[in-house]
Amino acid sequence: MTRWLAFERRWCRELCDAIVPVGDRSGRRPADVWGACHRLLDAAPRRFRVATRLAVWVVMWSPLLVQRRPRTLLALDQDRRDAVLQQAVASRRALVRDLVGVLQVVACVCLVRAVDASPVPVAAPGVRL
Amino acid sequence: MNLVAVDGRELRRDETLECDVVVVGSGPGGAPVARDLATAGADVVVLEEGPWLRAHDFTGDSLDALSTLYRDAGLATTTGPSPMPLLQGRVLGGTSVVNSAICWRLPRGVYEEWIADDPTLAEVLEWDAIEAAVTGLETTLGVGPTEPGVASGSDRLMARGADALGLGHRPTRRNVRGCRGSARCNRGCPAGAKLSMDTSLLPEAVVHGARIVTDARVERVTIGRGSATGVTARASGGARVSVRARDAVVLSAGATNTPALLLASGARHGPVGRRFQAHPGVAVAGLFAEPVNQWHGATQGHEITGLMDDGIKIETLALDPSLTAARLGSVGTALAKDVARLPHCITWAGAVRAEGMGRVARGRRGPRVTMPLTTRDLRRVRRTVQVIGEAMFAAGATAVAPGVAGFPSRVSDVAVMSRLGVDGPLDQRAYSLAISHMFGTCKLGTDPETSVIRGDFRHHAVDSLYVSDASVFPTNLGVNPQLSIMSLARCCATAIAKR
């Protein structure tokens, strides 16, 4: 697998948190989100790995793409992040929509890792439920 | 009982094996051939690209399952503007380890379509022989309707919704024995209750002397003087495995890999790789006021059969929690709230018998699959989503997430759901489709111009080379194919034994 740059790995981790801000039963976020992402991507075909890397950049700059605001997603507070992500998920541009969908699947697989039905993750600290 | 004679992960030196028959692939296409021929006294070697994993290896974790049980982690897709994931197992037992154990006999109407298209096929592929093959299998594999004790809340809701809409429905027939209803069929059965090939036919084959090589990816069929003489494979440990077969080489690598293997081996005769057909499917999520706990019961324990004449089949599907979350149509804080309510969610899937035909070509990094859908296919997909939504509301859902771009991500009014069938988009890119049933890329037939494989499953141009998987099916089926694949595989074994 092509080596991701350190800031891309951090973006990926933090964007996954923004897409699905959940933790475990005690509210702790999983310790090694990038480790889980890396494991999934390592088993995935090259096309998916490329799409995920592209998705990280597109979601990071989604405020610019969907609201014409020259800010990164991580620079916004959670309410504004939610609004931008919602617009990106429903974008008329299939490519934007699909790439957000790719990162959403990665985030869910890596963060909502319940072993069975009962231990449903709860919201992370700071997230209002 | 140790099933594996050679583990490719531990193989450090090149290995050469000799046998009567080598079978490439250990899923529903390969295992019955190996079992039947080994039982008849043949010296059989089975090569499997994936590892041998047992019930205690299946953790239930989605990431573990995707990265160890599925080809390309279930993330390989068709190419083109609207990629569809191609779901295939890559483990000893093949896709039977990760499917939901649903068993349907080959529909008589589909067989008659095949014969109407190629009347002389009936002389070599007789309906009675297919039926005889499947009867024995159903007994061996414990095929029967989902028992009420393991019906999930989602199964009961489907029955209620289908009744309200006047649609025929029934518990799915599955190949399980002692199912505990852990809803983890797609992540490997933790109870060993699913009678997948690794727990049913392959142990029988090994008892009768078959040798199994795991973690060995076949790269080429060796062909000399117009006849297949064996295969060469690369073990995951790096060594080369060569198998020389005295009587037959049987390819059972599935509808994407079998044609790719033929092309890589220079066997380009006929429409190999063309006529790719499938059952594209959608998954729709529903939310209920009360907890449903779809993960307590069979993974897919109930199905709506009332639309099958229209090419639509709907089933309950307990997607694992992470993939259920991804289907809810929400993001950010809203998704976190939904995740906290996952026990209130259900997912149902619908598959359509698509008319569109695609193609499998040989790519640098494996098979490259294209699959365009026709407008009629898209109408069926749209109707599938509509009916699932209507049935969920009829069963008491408070909201439905149809997962259709350009349509509300969360619908709470059945009238809006019904409108989808009229106003919904007819654009493939608007739907999140996935493919788990694939057919047709090495078509069976009597005319060497329009088919790749003869009626006795032998290649038209290469002697001693057989194909036994869904790639030989002249058309798609409209039903879950594993039992049909197994019954035709037994017919293939009979044809080889006659040689």
Image (tube, coloured by chain):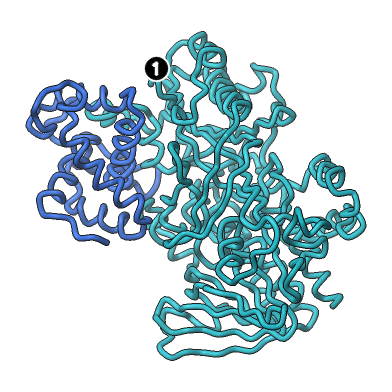
Chain colours: A blue, B cyan
Quarter of the image where the C terminus of chain B is located: bottom right
Disc 1 is placed on an element classified as loop
Can residue A67 be seen in this snapshot? yes
What residue is at 36 percent from the left and 27 percent from the top? B329
Direction from residue A28 to residue B228 in the image, left or right: right
Direction from residue B329 to residue B256 in the image, left or right: right
Residue B164 sits above or below residue B153 on the image? above
Can residue B157 be seen in this snapshot? no
Query: Disc 1: which chain?
Result: B
Label 1 crowd bin: few (<14), some (14–19), many (20+), radius 10 Å:
some
Q: Nearer the viewer, residue A72 or B320?
A: A72
Residue B265 screen position, x and y as percent: 59, 72
Direction from residue B219 to residue B470 in the image, left or right: right
Q: Nearer the viewer, residue A114 or B216?
A: B216
Residue at mark 1:
B408
Residue B38 sits above or below residue A89 on the image? below
